[in-house]
Image (spheres, coloured by chain):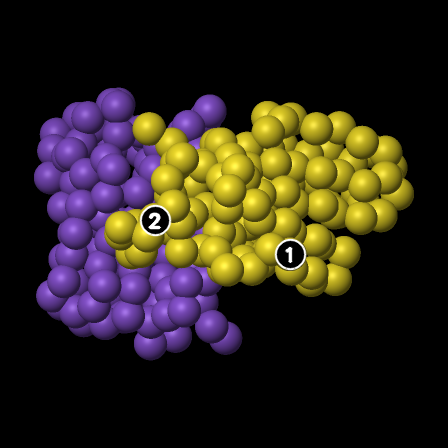
Amino acid sequence: SQQGEEDPQALSIQEGENATMNCSYKTSINNLQWYRQNSGRGLVHLILIRSNEREKHSGRLRVTLDTSKKSSSLLITASRAADTASYFCATDMKTSYDKVIFGPGTSLSVIP
Amino acid sequence: EAQVTQNPRYLITVTGKKLTVTCSQNMNHEYMSWYRQDPGLGLRQIYYSMNVEVTDKGDVPEGYKVSRKEKRNFPLILESPSPNQTSLYFCASSRTGELFFGEGSRLTVL
């Protein structure tokens, strides 16, 4: 079964708005990462947050991690049409840090 | 340029015809992994390798083999492909946890 589950499955917003995607997972983790995938292309790493961190920023991205709720959120501020892509969270479990497990992803459409 | 290179990028084959998808990375990464991506299922890990001669099963290893004889290469072998192995395959490598992905290999098994 999937370790991570993103929510919503699909999101459509206007350019300039903020986009928020959530990820829930089931077991304790070492790290949680977010990746982006343009249609049919390879995934690109966006940000990694460690289990002892609560919030991390990178440019227009803000990631939060709540280990008590086993959840994370990815916020993209001031979205652009070029942000249209699928976004995945990935976790590596404390019991097996070498197995990185991806959720099914959130498909984001940013309308110009 | 740091990259993960997969070949072939596209392949149509028939049931039972052995095939190999190659993966090579030029970043001297110890960790390499294979994933398959199917609609609605996200990426599922097939096999991974922590270093040369060290490989382990992921979540969906059935029907696949791998080898890690050199640090830079991690080929995925389908000994007898079946239609349910039609998928988009990704190879990835890592040193510090951040995964670097290849561009993918779209495989169709008829």
**Disc 2/disc 1 C-alpha distance (Å):** 19 Å
Indicate the amino acid at tag 1. Glu
Q: Badge 1 is on which residue?
A: A55
Question: Looking at the image, which residue is at 65% across and 45% down?
Answer: A74
Residue at point 33% right, 71% down? B29
The answer to whether A90 appears left or right of A78 in the picture is: left
Residue B81 seen in the figure: yes
Disc with the residue nearer the chain's start (2 vs 1): 1
Which part of the image, by quadrant, shows the N terminus of chain A?
Answer: top left
Image-based side of A28 in relation to B40, left or right: left
Chain to which mark 2 belongs: A
Q: Chain of mark 1?
A: A
Q: What residue is drawn where x is 26% and y is 30%? A: B85
Q: Colour of chain A?
A: yellow
Mark 1 nearby-residue class (10 Å; few <14, some 14–19, many ≥20): some
Left or right: where B32 falls relative to A88 = left
Q: Quadrant of residue A57?
A: bottom right
Q: Nearer the viewer, residue B107 or B99?
A: B99
The local secondary structure at tag 2 comes to strand
